[in-house]
Image (cartoon, rainbow, N blue to C red):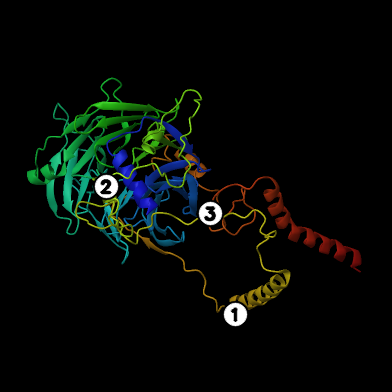
Amino acid sequence: MFHQLFLCFVAESFGQNYPEEADGTLDCISMALTCTFNRWGTLLAVGCNDGRIVIWDFLTRGIAKIISAHIHPVCSLCWSRDGHKLVSASTDNIVSQWDVLSGDCDQRFRFPSPILKVQYHPRDQNKVLVCPMKSAPVMLTLSDSKHVVLPVDDDSDLNVVASFDRRGEYIYTGNAKGKILVLKTDSQDLVASFRVTTGTSNTTAIKSIEFARKGSCFLINTADRIIRVYDGREILTCGRDGEPEPMQKLQDLVNRTPWKKCCFSGDGEYIVAGSARQHALYIWEKSIGNLVKILHGTRGELLLDVAWHPVRPIIASISSGVVSIWAQNQVENWSAFAPDFKELDENVEYEERESEFDIEDEDKSEPEQTGADAAEDEEVDVTSVDPIAAFCSSDEELEDSKALLYLPIAPEVEDPEENPYGPPPDAVQTSLMDEGASSEKKRQSSADGSQPPKKKPKTTNIELQGVPNDEVHPLLGVKGDGKSKKKQAGRPKGSKGKEKDSPFKPKLYKGDRGLPLEGSAKGKVQAELSQPLTALSGLLRGLAVYSP
């Protein structure tokens, strides 16, 4: 109930605002490359350079889970609608679906070329849209591992970006010649199309297409450094080869800044664009088109990704491997909690009333109950929970009861052996004997092969005709030094499948929190690891002494 009231207060208080200053950073230990909020803004998934996916509890600003997802850097992430699944893409052309609670991989897909973007269908998490390099977009069906290659306008121009619309009814694609196609999701039929042109009728390449969470607006980021905002209803009305006019054209007229990443605010009233030259965020008001704020990060850093919180005026941006948080300046207003509260500059002597601490004020006369006082006697419903409007679409009345808003975090116990609330010593010895017997049975069953091994995720190879196999992902590709750059990124060679079980890690981690062990705890773990080696060396010395 408190959670519902808190989010209602947040949604109403911060509905029309935008962030104004830096509000700290999130350090994922690894180098962060991409980030995305879940549908409610309670969890933030961050893809890292070493292949890990770090999930942050955004209310507590703490790490809730770390998934060792890929060997190579994670380049794209997307949450499912109910928050139980994550789909990720890495620079080695692998697309994987993950169970967020267990951290297990459900399915894998191997593509012939690098993946630029993955996106769940907004209403059907069985479908995933994939944008490979130098290829037409592909729509995956997870239940039967099948795929459909979407039609393109020009077979010779395969630099195509794509995105689902707000409800997944249509797929919008754009190519390097400025042509936008609107396809029906179910049948892939062409519904509408138009061409983005500059003032001189020249075409410009489409870099990205982003839709607002509320309303029918979407934006197109193009190579001519202009962000164009369109109304999706007008696009469908114009039909094929239409000539719709953008609602707004947003750009930096002074510096001619190219844009790395653009997105809408949670309510769709603001647009933020991250500069491709520096760590700077430009915020416009969509209805008027005026620039309202520029947020400057550390000078000399390059921006990698930007994400706006779905409900609150908070932006997460990534530069130099660190997630920066931008929020409003919160001013403490105690009168909101106590209407008669007064802030004093200096101490004032308080005069106590004669009846202040009496249980009942005998001299007080009882006024007649009218208006609000009379309403206090009415019965108030405190059991039913009203849905939060910010979390419901316009065609929904109720929230998803099975949605995953938070991840459980196990408490960390520094010295579990010194537990004053544990069972008595006799019970501990008995339980240890039982555990030893059960572990012996497990070893025997595993030796017999009766215990089933952990199920490996199914890997499906996606065959795409005419797609080059030697492409390098833009995150890795550097002119003249592509191969060496690719070898440096990701985990060390030969570490695949050994990270969880190998005791010889460069860093020791505590559970899923991803925090390095320090001090006495680290020495304790290292001592435990060195005990078998010490025993083995002593045995070898004994054999050397008694050898004939």
Q: Is mark 1 on a helix, strand or loop?
A: helix
- Dot 3 and dot 1 residues touching (CB under 8 Å): no
- Rounded to the nearest angstrom, the CA distance separating label 2 from label 3 is 57 Å
Q: Name the residue under label 3.
A: 512
Name the residue rendered at 31%, 27% in the picture: 293
Which one is earlier in the sequence, the residue at label 2 or at label 3?
2
Q: Mark 2 points at which residue?
A: 369
Please state which of the two labelled residues, at mark 2 or mark 3, is closer to the viewer: 2
Q: What element carries label 2?
A: loop
Name the residue rendered at 26%, 52% in the picture: 392
Q: Which residue lies furthest to the top in this view?
A: 254
- Badge 2 crowding class, 10 Å Cα cut-off, few under 14, some 14 to 19, many 20 or more, is few
Quarter of the rendering containing residue 274:
top left
**Residue 11's x, y, as percent?**
31, 43
Q: Which of 530 and 376 is in front in this view?
A: 376
The amino acid pointed to by label 2 is Gln
Q: Mark 1 points at which residue?
A: 448
- Badge 1 crowding class, 10 Å Cα cut-off, few under 14, some 14 to 19, many 20 or more, is few
Which one is earlier in the sequence, the residue at label 3 or at label 1?
1
**Residue 531's x, y, as percent?**
75, 59
Q: Where's the N terminus, which quadrant? A: bottom left
**Residue 271's x, y, as percent?**
27, 35
Q: Going by the image, does 108 lie left or right of 283?
A: right
- Rounded to the nearest angstrom, the CA distance separating label 2 from label 1 is 81 Å
